[in-house]
Image (cartoon, helix red, strand yellow):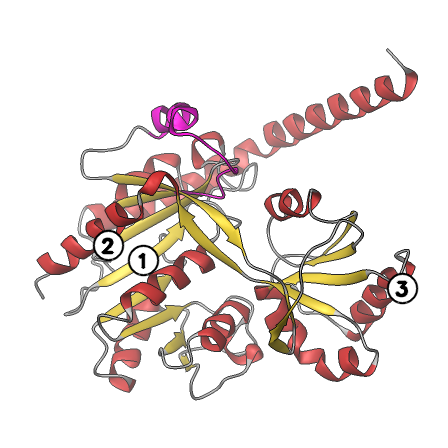
Amino acid sequence: MPLLQYRASTLKTNEVIREYLVKVLLSPFSLLYGLGVSIRNLLYQKGVLRPARFDIPIISVGNLSIGGTGKSPHIEYLVRWLKEYMPVAILSRGYKRESTGFQLGQQFPSVKIIGDEPYQFLSKFPDVPIAVSENRELGIPYLLKSYPDTRLVLLDDAFQHLSVKPYINILLTSYEAPFTRDYLLPSGRLREWRSSYTRADIIIVTKCPPGLISTEASTLLKEINLASHQSIFFTEYNYQLPYYIFNPRYRINWNKEMYVLLLSGIANTDYLELYLKDRVAHVQLLSFADHHWYSNFDLGQIKRQFDELPGPNKLILTTEKDASRLSLHRGYLIENKIPMFVLPVEVNFLWNEEQRFKDTIAQKLIEFKS
């Protein structure tokens, strides 16, 4: 074996060993965390704690892991479809916002007040009520008081919020990192025991690789082992052409001579990097923590790394969620003529299953009784 190949293999082996040892060392803390989760869930199962129910259907979209399953594109899919038939609203937690309590996006259209993901929703759907609240049980009545014509509420990232009983519970899990192969925090990324998946009415396996055929998904189907009341669907990302951050109408095409600085403050970029690999000459990743608030220092670092990219055919690419936070630095980006582009994304259902998904949701909504 060549020396460089041997060293690479050794480094990979050492990394796997370190990861395994960390999980073993953290496993007692995971058990304590899991015990607390189990006690809370049991209190709801036994009726000691009772979830709130509402006179309109509530659809929850969430996951078992701490991020990276693509909740935002799936919520956007539901909004685009359902708002054509009924008045829809979105209630989110507003993670890492600089405010507390219930805040209405239409009243405070600021990314700092409502958070990056709700701000992204508001930018795309200005006619759809967008609100944030840490307490969903209190947030829904406030939202309905502000918009009494609302006939459906979408709860963003609410699978663990048992204080509200959703009428339809949608659980997302990514194809490459499904909950069936993960562990409880802090040794893994799960917020609940794997068995909690049975609360879901619909499971969506997201970020499937291009060209995935149904037979290749059979192993994961066996791992999940659907309950009798559950349906499952598989989706993939459909990236659109990137647009200039301050002018969505100005879009560009990819070319094989382009150098890209990929700026990311999201949970996982593997899927995005794979998409770019065969479309541009080179991708350099500059990664920050999920929901990171970019500082002036960060902008200087971003500009330096961009300037160091070779050739004139280069740009900075970021996600829609990051763009919400980067919009706070509009003056700096324009003044320094930084070509910051945003990569929009939508979801596609695999194997012509979109209509079955819509029929599943529609049938349950027809059966709803307040």
Kindly indicate whether the residue at mark 3 contacts the one at mark 1 (C-beta within 8 angstroms). no
Q: Which of the pair 245/169 is nearer the observer?
A: 245
Q: Report, in whole angstroms, how far the alpha carbon at label 2 lies from the one at label 1.
A: 6 Å
Provide the residue designation for mark 3: 307
Residue 130 spot, x, y in % from top left: 39, 76
What numbered label is drawn on residue 26? none
Q: Secondary structure at mark 2?
A: strand
Residue in view at x 35 percent, y 53 percent: 159
- Pick whichever of labels 1 and 3 is earlier in the sequence: 1
Q: Secondary structure at mark 3?
A: helix
For label 1, count other residues whose C-alpha is less than 10 Å away and answer few (under 14), some (14-19) or many (20+). Answer: many
Residue 104 spot, x, y in % from top left: 41, 82
Residue in view at x 25 percent, y 79 percent: 144
Kindly indicate whether the residue at mark 3 contacts the one at mark 2 (C-beta within 8 angstroms). no
Kindly indicate whether the residue at mark 1 contacts the one at mark 2 (C-beta within 8 angstroms). yes
Provide the residue designation for mark 2: 168
Provide the residue designation for mark 1: 60
Instruction: Report the span colored magenta.
Output: 205-224
Look at discs 1 and 3 and give the one toward the viewer.
3
- Pick whichever of labels 2 and 1 is earlier in the sequence: 1
Q: Is residue 156 left or right of residue 83?
A: right
Q: Is residue 33 left or right of residue 283?
A: left
Q: Secondary structure at mark 1?
A: strand
Q: Is residue 133 above or below residue 73?
A: below
Q: Is residue 254 above or below residue 236?
A: below
Q: Report, in whole angstroms, how far the alpha carbon at label 2 lies from the one at label 3.
A: 49 Å
- Pick whichever of labels 2 and 3 is earlier in the sequence: 2
Look at label 2 and name its amino acid: Ile
